Amino acid sequence: MTTQAMNPKSTSLRTTLGAVLLTSGLFLSASVASAADNTLYAQGFANNSSASQTASDYGWSVYRNGDSIEGVTATFKIINSSAGADAIENVNALKPYGDNILAGMMAMANNVGDTVAFATLDAPISRAAYESLSFGMQTKGPAAAEFRFVLKIGDTVYVSEQTFTPSSTSTWGSVSLELTDASRWAEVTGLTGESFSIAGTSSELSALTGNITGVGLYSKMGGSSSRYADNFVVTGTPIPEPSTCALTAGIAVILGCMIFRRRNAARHFE
């Protein structure tokens, strides 16, 4: 019985090829992970105290028609407490604090009127850096009520043309909106006056220039029941960096060359 000595060049090539494959696999996995949806902002309105809190405690400003309210006053407490047993639908799944499950939600009583509420972002969101952006939240209230999403670009506040009707006064429903270029937004004016107004015409998002500086919700009064919102979130899918694309292509070329050389070497020593 005869044995054939292992070709050292073939062994070296296999080792190198394995290393490149492992490295490229790790790199590509990281690239895919970085391209997944990122949470850019999340607010669950957690409040396990015995009293309701003002929205400003959560970094939100609230404006309502019929009152000259800029921001939130001490008499306008809008974040409900978790008095009594926590309801599972009110659990703050986005922002748990340590091991505690904290409840809380934004509540707008039927006598509050139409409401615009939003958070001013610490760091503006660059729309050019994301392939897609989406809003999401949970709502409940009377069928005659209405919710919209709020978008602040620069110093101008807009509400989405698309509206959302609560599914029930007792059951939470999830709503979402993708910020496509074709999504339409109407400007809100008069927030610091006696009452605000929403423009009768809307513009496509592609026509609105600037970074996103604030996000939130609009709620229209309907019926005799209160309206509620919870678990507000903004997500985005980043655009891959050009260097990432170039490096991925480079790895593919290297792998192709090494496989070609390996096949040629194998034929030579057969």
Image (cartoon, rainbow, N blue to C red):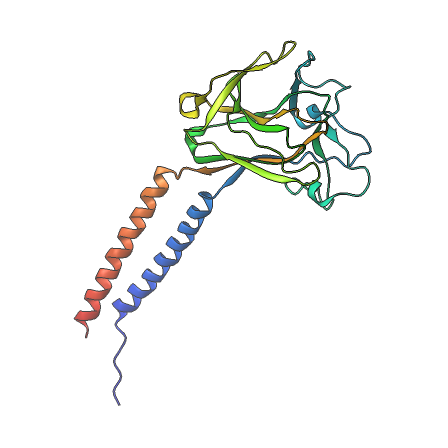
Looking at the image, residue 158 sits to the left or right of residue 258; the answer is right
x%, y% of residue 257? 24, 56
Q: Is 194 situated above or below 147?
A: above
Q: Quadrant of residue 72?
A: top right
The extreme top residue here reads 193
Quadrant the C terminus occupies: bottom left
Looking at the image, residue 211 sits to the left or right of residue 105; the answer is left
Looking at the image, residue 19 sits to the left or right of residue 186; the answer is left
- Residue at (22, 61) in percent of width and height: 261
Q: Is 18 situated above or below 170?
A: below
Q: Is 259 situated above or below 218?
A: below
Residue placed most toward the observer, 99 or 207: 207
- Residue at (49, 41) in percent of width and height: 37
x%, y% of residue 110? 72, 24
Residue placed most toward the observer, 205 or 61: 205
x%, y% of residue 232? 61, 34
Quadrant the N terminus occupies: bottom left
The number of numbered badges drawn on the structure is: 0
Q: Is 186 situated above or below 234?
A: above
- Residue at (75, 21) in percent of width and height: 76
Q: Quadrant of residue 19?
A: bottom left
Residue placed most toward the observer, 231 or 160: 160
The extreme bottom residue here reads 1
Residue placed most toward the observer, 122 or 135: 135
x%, y% of residue 144? 64, 29
